[in-house]
Image (cartoon, grey):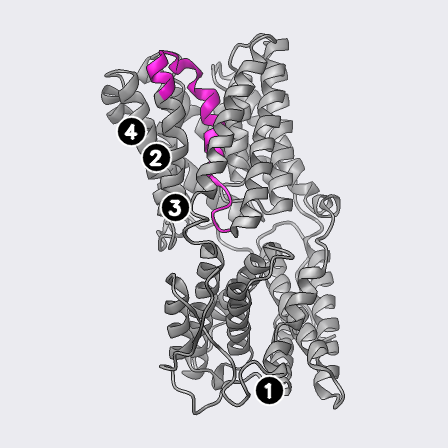
Amino acid sequence: MSSATPTPTRVRRLPVVGALRLGRPSDVWFKPALSVVAAVAPPSLLLVALGRLDLAAYTMAGSLCALYAHHRPYAARAKVLAWVVLGMLGGLAVALVTASLTRNAVVLVTVGALLAAVQKAVCDATRVGPPAHVILTFVSSATLFVPQTLGQVPGHLALAAAAGAWAWLVGMAPAPLRPHGPERRATAQALNTAAAYAETARGGEESAGARSAAYAAVHAAWQALLAARNRPSTTRRALERLVVRAEVALAAPADTDPARLRAWADAVRGSGRVPRTGDPRRDEGSLGERDELVGVAAERAVAPRPLWSRLGLLAPLAVRTALGCALAGYVSLALGADRPYWALVTAASLYQANLTLTWSRAVQRVVGNLVGVLLFAAVTPVARLGPLALVLCILACNFGAEALIGRNYWLGSVCVTPLALLVTELPGYQPTGELVTDRVVDTLVGALVGFAAALAVTDRRAGRRVERALTAVDRARERAARLAAGPASTPAALEAARRGLAAAIVDLRATADAAAGEWWQRALPQERVVLAEQAAHRTLAATVRRQGLLPDPGTTSTQTHTEDTSP
């Protein structure tokens, strides 16, 4: 381990303009946008035809599950969506039963805050998202303040369950057409980011940010491919070989042809055959080519960490959420608000991996909501033309929110805010001025009180997690270096060591970035992190050369060997 002395962490200025800067939209922004419209429309239109639009809030709870798991392979998506629907029904059941037993606003806010904390912790531990816990918290908190009787609860839950089952079908609908679509997109992203990093490195302008982004994209691709455990296929094995090539490019960018990586990425994005990546210096189908995937098979066989152990690391974030949501709701009640859950949900939406990101989300939430109430005021005359017009406006807001939120959270909030306000009008129209005023006040209360709670509850374990990540990288690097230097090392051992070191680097960078955004903690060993990353990258390059995975320098980027990967 390096003996470099720690350097004090500088206090970062809180970003304002930077937090509002627009990014590039997601490559598949239209998928969640169209899915939520397809999931919400049929149940809502059916209720319009039956004259029971007042029940649409319950069907919409199940329909909104269609927003989840679009980046996951379909085998994994089926399970994740099922769990999301069950989680939505569980939170809704607690809220409905509580609402039927008491009308004490303080009790309702307390229950809503505890539910928000549980939903936040579970979604973060299982990496469900986007949109993670926010949708679940919005539904459970809103229904807490809808008058209920115990006799109505089963019927309302049945409506949500039926809509949730429809949302599951909507989420799985593309599977027959493009059974490997999510894996293909993740692989293409990994290849493109690896090509971008190789270009900067070969040009003498190596960027730590580009390298971290490339490693994160490669890690995400592996996660997508490993999500379908024990489901090997010809296509998936071909995609795994491509991700191996992206990893090789990161380890040895000077020996990489970026144009070739981009050509592979373009081919993968389509629905045709996956490019063959076999080293032309070897016979195709040889044992050497198959050895590349030994580490992949080993990793697929490893069981994931138990949920309880992942939840333990999120205790500070759960406490932040519970405290911030509860205080926001109490302050809103003290100000005479009729819908304190708006302040509660605003606070719940703020909490990110660290305080710096939480501040940025607070800025985005406030700006988006303030612009959103203006949009609501403009849309209200159209929405009040009739039940059908109201449903169509809700569908338009759903589509706009998912289409825009990928560019920046505040831009999506511009559509989310009128959506939430329109949902309150499903049982009946309400004064526009009162709704706008309440929403603005609750947004400001939720943002201010929620961020204050984040300041009060700091993550003191962040520094220890960085130390553990550094230790993990050092151990993985030492193992890889020992195997790379050993003349009798097997291809399987080398591959497993390389994959383990690459995963440790990604974890170290994510842990260090999260810790750097925390306040009120001891100085982080930033220099040790940088030195550990540099040493690990050198070891990766040595391991890649020892494995003989570098492409032939004489191979051109236009090579288009393919293999049949039809299901």
The quadrant in which the N terminus is found is bottom right
Magenta part of the protein: which range? 46-72
- Name the residue located 39 percent from the left edge and 46 percent from the top edge: 31
Of labels 4 and 1, earlier in sequence is 4
For mark 1, give the secondary structure: loop
Location of residue 111 (image quadrant):
top right
Question: Image height check: is 407 above or below 469?
Answer: above
Q: Circle 3 sits on which residue? A: 31
Distance from disc 4 to disc 1, alpha carbons, whole Å, reads 61 Å
Q: Is residue 3 left or right of residue 506?
A: right
Question: Image height check: is 131 above or below 474?
Answer: above
Looking at the image, is mark 4 or mark 2 nearer the viewer? 2
For mark 4, give the secondary structure: helix
The mark found on residue 415 in the picture is 2
User: Which amino acid lies under the numbered mark 2 shown in the image of this protein?
Assistant: Cys
Of labels 4 and 2, earlier in sequence is 4
The mark found on residue 548 in the picture is 1
Distance from disc 2 to disc 1, alpha carbons, whole Å, reads 52 Å
Of labels 3 and 1, earlier in sequence is 3
User: Which amino acid lies under the numbered mark 3 shown in the image of this protein?
Assistant: Lys
Looking at the image, is mark 3 or mark 4 nearer the viewer? 3
User: Which amino acid lies under the numbered mark 1 shown in the image of this protein?
Assistant: Gly
Residue 351 visible in image: no
User: Which amino acid lies under the numbered mark 4 shown in the image of this protein?
Assistant: Leu
